[in-house]
């Protein structure tokens, strides 16, 4: 049976939420963003969760949000950039469906994340160096988690969505059916 959801993983600024929404519209699927699930359940912003309770607590909430999706069907699921850090999350995401990794060049990532100052992990003295270090540390995890990886650097959102759907159909016989 083909997987019934598409899961998007990738670094902050790789386009998971924008592409996810577009895919959901195209396929007439629901769009779910694990960061939004965490915010709704906690009743507060992610920056506040980090500030008050620390990253480990945020990661626990993130794992719980991923677990809560078990059995979901017909969804496009965008994850936070650190969702791949825990092995258990990587296994759960794979069980949910086809895991697609989105990448972009470091310059483009930095340019995109600089437009928004809400990300707690990038509130450092040298955000550029932080992006570089986090990307280097996480790259192998994104690669391990994803069955299909798309470089979004030079593509429009529509092009990325086209490519995901074409490759999903060709390589994984994915037709969106549960
Ligand atoms: C994080 C990425 C964020 C959010 C949190 C931590 C990370 O999501 O989950 O700030 O560890 O990379 P986005 O990738 O949607 O920005």
Image (tube, grey):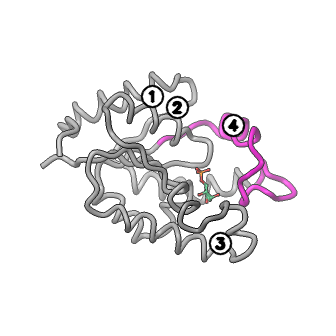
Mark 1 or 2 closer to N-term? 2
Q: CA distance from mark 1 to mark 3?
A: 31 Å
Q: Which residue is mark 4?
A: 112
Q: Which residue is nearer to you in this view: 122 or 126? A: 122
Q: Residue 103: x, y in percent?
A: 53, 40
Mark 1 or 3 closer to N-term? 3
User: Is ligand 1 closer than 8 angstroms to the Cβ of mark 3?
Assistant: yes
User: Is ligand 1 closer than 8 angstroms to the Cβ of mark 4?
Assistant: no
Q: Which residue is mark 3?
A: 55
> Residue 149 has which mark?
none
Mark 3 or 4 closer to N-term? 3
Range of residues picked out in magenta = 102-129
Q: CA distance from mark 2 to mark 3?
A: 28 Å
Q: Which residue is nearer to you in this view: 2 or 23? A: 23
Mark 2 or 3 closer to N-term? 3
Tell me if residue 111 is in the magenta stretch.
Answer: yes
Asked if residue 2 is positioned above or below residue 15 in the image, the reply reads below
Q: Are marks 1 and 3 in contact (CB under 8 Å)?
A: no
Q: Identify the residue shown where x is 52% and y is 23%.
A: 155
Q: Secondary structure at mark 3?
A: helix
Give the number of the mark in front: 2 or 3.
3
Q: Residue 59: x, y in percent?
A: 56, 71
Q: Which residue is nearer to you in this view: 73 or 158? A: 73
> Residue 152 has which mark?
2
Q: CA distance from mark 2 to mark 4?
A: 12 Å
User: Is ligand 1 closer than 8 angstroms to the Cβ of mark 2?
Assistant: no
Q: Which residue is mark 1?
A: 160
């Amino acid at each position: 049976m083909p997987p019934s959801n598409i899961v998007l993983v990738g670094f902050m600024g790789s386009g998971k939420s924008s592409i996810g929404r577009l895919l959901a519209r195209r396929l007439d699927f629901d769009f779910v963003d694990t960061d939004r699930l965490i915010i709704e359940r906690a009743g507060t912003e992610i920056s506040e969760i980090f500030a008050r309770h620390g990253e480990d607590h945020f990661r626990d909430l993130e794992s719980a949000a991923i677990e809560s999706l078990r059995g979901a069907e017909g969804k496009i699921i965008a994850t936070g950039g650190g969702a791949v850090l825990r092995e258990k999350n990587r296994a759960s995401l794979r069980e949910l469906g086809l895991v697609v990794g989105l990448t972009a060049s470091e310059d483009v990532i930095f340019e995109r994340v600089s437009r928004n100052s809400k990300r707690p992990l990038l509130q450092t003295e040298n955000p550029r160096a932080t992006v570089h270090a986090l990307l280097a540390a996480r790259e192998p995890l994104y690669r391990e988690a994803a069955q299909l990886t798309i470089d979004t650097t030079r593509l429009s959102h529509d092009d990325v969505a086209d490519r995901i759907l074409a490759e999903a159909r060709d390589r994984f016989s994915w037709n969106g059916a549960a």
